Structures are given as C-alpha cells and as structure tokens.
C-alpha cells in the first residue's frame, strides 16, 4: 500500500466528493479519479466508493480497505518514529482535529513554527465538529483534538490549554444600543481582556429579549450554553439562524445579518475591526469556558506527539 493511496481514499471519504478532495489534496480531479481507479484495478476491480450516491461514500469493501490501510499507516509511523528517535532525529506524523477557528487562527501558525524546528515531522490538520473529532480520536484517525467540549475522561487524557470568554455582539443598527451605550465595550477592552475586571458592568440581557439571535446548532456546546445564558436573563431567544461554528456566526453577523450573536472574545485578535457590531460583556458564569487538549490514554503518545503537546501548551500561554 502506498501512503498516497491512503491519503486519497481518506480525503474522499471525509469530503464526500472527488472534487472537494482533489482541492484539499492540491491535485486535479482527473488525477485523483485515475489514482483511485488504478487502486481498484489492483484490488481485482472491486469498487471502493459508491459513486452513484451523493455525497460519495465508501462501499463496505472500501471501509474494510481504509481501516486496514489506517492500521498499516500507524505501524509505518511507529517504525519510522522508533528508529528516528534512536538516531536523534524527530520524525513522524501527527494528525490534529479541531474547529475552523482553532485550525485557521491558532494552530496553523503554531504548527508552522514547530515544523521549522523539526522539519522531518508532518502534521495534518483536520477541521471538524466535536463529534467528528471524538470519533477520529477513538478510531485512531486523529492523534490530538482541541475543543471547548470534553470527551470521555475515562478514554482520553485532558489538558486545559487556556480559557475563553463569550461576548455578545449586537448590530449597530439596532435602536437598543442607545439604551445600552453605557455598557458597550471598546474593542481594546476585549483584546486586552480588561472587560473581565469586576468594575466593568455586564449588559442586562433581558433588554434584548425581543431581538433575533444567531445560535449554534443543537449538537454544539454553544447551543446549550447560549440558551442557558438567555434563560438566566428570563427569556428564550428568538433564533433567526443556526450555524455550525462560532467563527462563521460572528462573520455572518459582522457582514450585515441583522441578528445578535455570542462569540469568543479572541476572535477580535484575528479579524478586522468593524463598526457594524457593538460589543457587550455577559454577566453569567457560563460565558467562561475552558479549551481542552484531548489525547487517547492508550496507546501511549509517541515522543514526537509529547514534544508537540509541550510546544503547543507553551505557545498557547504566550
């Protein structure tokens, strides 16, 4: 089995599309299709994908092949890491899964700096939901996961990488902002986290009870957290739009969607200032949450993985 074949089949199975997988792999769709047909030819013309389905999905034989290929890939990495460690060279592959926000704004730069120190290593970054992340960690497709939700502590070792705080964004066009002007936060207060000082007042959220909100979908931590914050203020939010990611929800709101949005305070570090939103502090303890690093208890992480975890923890504290 060629490692390229494993990457190709895995990408198609995750994307559900040959075209999207080709874009992710930086190859043309005809080249990817040709590679899969060649692989299927070597497997006695047994198809690995049901191409009539939308999205494209693995056949039972394709699922069998992918699982065995994953096991071979793990063993190849273990052998390579064992001998590279003996030789004093850090080599190997680490697969990391996280949300779009952490992948785009936090992990990409950290991974770049780590690879500058250890050019022999390869780190793959997969954007995924919490449920997909946990499933990937369980079956070995992912080595590390980073999210605000905690997977089963009996299966995973959990490390707190930091904390984040939810902020409320209200479209500047809403008349209620005049009534709330004494509570509005300046962007620099959010960036420096000086808004956490007890002297900075939290907004009376009940004054926004008749306004529309963008919320996370039910499967997200942000769904129950945001709804609970609203219930504490004495109302059920009027939801105009449900989203998969907080980053997407924030961008939709800042780009003109007339709805309030809860978002993580650190987003302002990575996005351009906007006059379209007013920012407000939330008084609920639920507005604070931890960022968790998850890794399976068994098998024991490789030395490369342990070194990356140490590097990641130091970088997140900077």
Image (tube, helix red, strand yellow):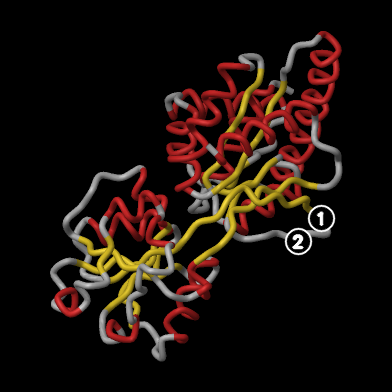
The residue that appears at 39% across and 54% down in the rendered structure is: 247
- Residue 172: x, y in percent? 17, 66
Q: Secondary structure at mark 1?
A: loop
**x and y, in percent, of residue 260 in the image:** 29, 71
Q: Nearer the viewer, residue 22 or 276?
A: 276
Q: Quadrant of residue 238?
A: bottom left
State the residue lying farthest toward the bottom. Answer: 234
Closer-to-camera residue (233/139): 233
* Quadrant location, the N terminus: top right
Q: Residue at x 72, y 28 (%)?
A: 307
Q: How far across and how far down the image is residue 50, in percent?
A: 58, 47
Q: Position of residue 155 (x, y in %)?
A: 81, 55
Q: Nearer the viewer, residue 190 or 244?
A: 190
**Residue at the image position 43 percent from the left and 62 percent from the top:** 196
Is 40 left, or right, of 229 in this rendering? right
User: From the viewer's perspective, is 15 left or right of 256?
Assistant: right
Q: Residues within 10 Å of mark 2 (few under 14, many from 20)?
A: few
The relative height of residue 234 versus residue 24 in the rendered view (above or below) is below
Kindly check if marks 1 and 2 are in contact, taking CB atoms under 8 A apart as contact.
Answer: yes
Local packing at callout 1 (Cα closer than 10 Å; few below 14, some 14-19, many 20+) is some
Residue 157 shown left or right of residue 35 in the figure: right
- How many numbered callouts? 2
Tell whether 217 sits left or right of 169: right
Residue highlighted by disc 1? 155
Give me the disc on residue 152: 2
14 or 260: which is nearer to us?
260
Q: Secondary structure at mark 2?
A: loop
């Amino acid at each position: 089995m060629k490692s390229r074949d494993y990457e190709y089949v895995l990408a198609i199975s995750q994307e559900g599309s040959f075209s999207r997988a080709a874009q992710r792999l930086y190859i043309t769709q005809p080249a990817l299709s040709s590679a899969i047909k060649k692989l299927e030819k070597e497997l006695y013309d047994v198809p690995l994908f049901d191409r009539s389905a939308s999205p494209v999905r693995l056949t039972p034989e394709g699922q069998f092949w992918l699982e065995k290929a994953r096991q071979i890939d793990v063993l190849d990495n273990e052998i390579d890491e064992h001998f590279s460690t003996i030789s004093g060279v850090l080599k190997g592959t680490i697969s990391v899964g996280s949300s779009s926000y952490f992948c785009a704004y936090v992990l990409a730069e950290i991974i770049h700096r780590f690879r500058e120190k250890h050019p022999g290593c390869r780190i793959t970054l997969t954007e995924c939901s919490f449920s997909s992340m946990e499933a990937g960690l369980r079956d070995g497709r992912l080595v590390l996961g980073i999210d605000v939700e905690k997977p089963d502590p009996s299966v995973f070792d959990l490390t707190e990488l930091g904390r984040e705080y939810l902020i409320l964004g209200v479209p500047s066009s809403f008349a209620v902002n005049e009534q709330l002007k004494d509570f509005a936060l300046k962007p620099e207060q959010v960036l420096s986290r000086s808004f956490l000082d007890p002297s900075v007042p939290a907004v009376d959220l009940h004054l926004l009870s008749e306004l529309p909100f963008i919320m996370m979908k039910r499967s997200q931590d942000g769904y129950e957290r945001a709804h609970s914050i609203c219930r504490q203020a004495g109302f059920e939010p009027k939801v105009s739009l449900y989203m998969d990611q907080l980053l997407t929800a924030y961008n939709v709101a800042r780009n003109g969607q007339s709805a309030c949005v809860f978002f993580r305070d650190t987003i302002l570090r990575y996005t351009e200032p906007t006059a379209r939103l007013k920012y407000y502090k939330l008084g609920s303890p639920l507005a604070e949450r931890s960022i968790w690093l998850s890794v399976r208890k068994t098998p024991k992480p490789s030395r490369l993985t342990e070194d990356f975890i140490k590097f990641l923890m130091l970088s997140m504290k900077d």
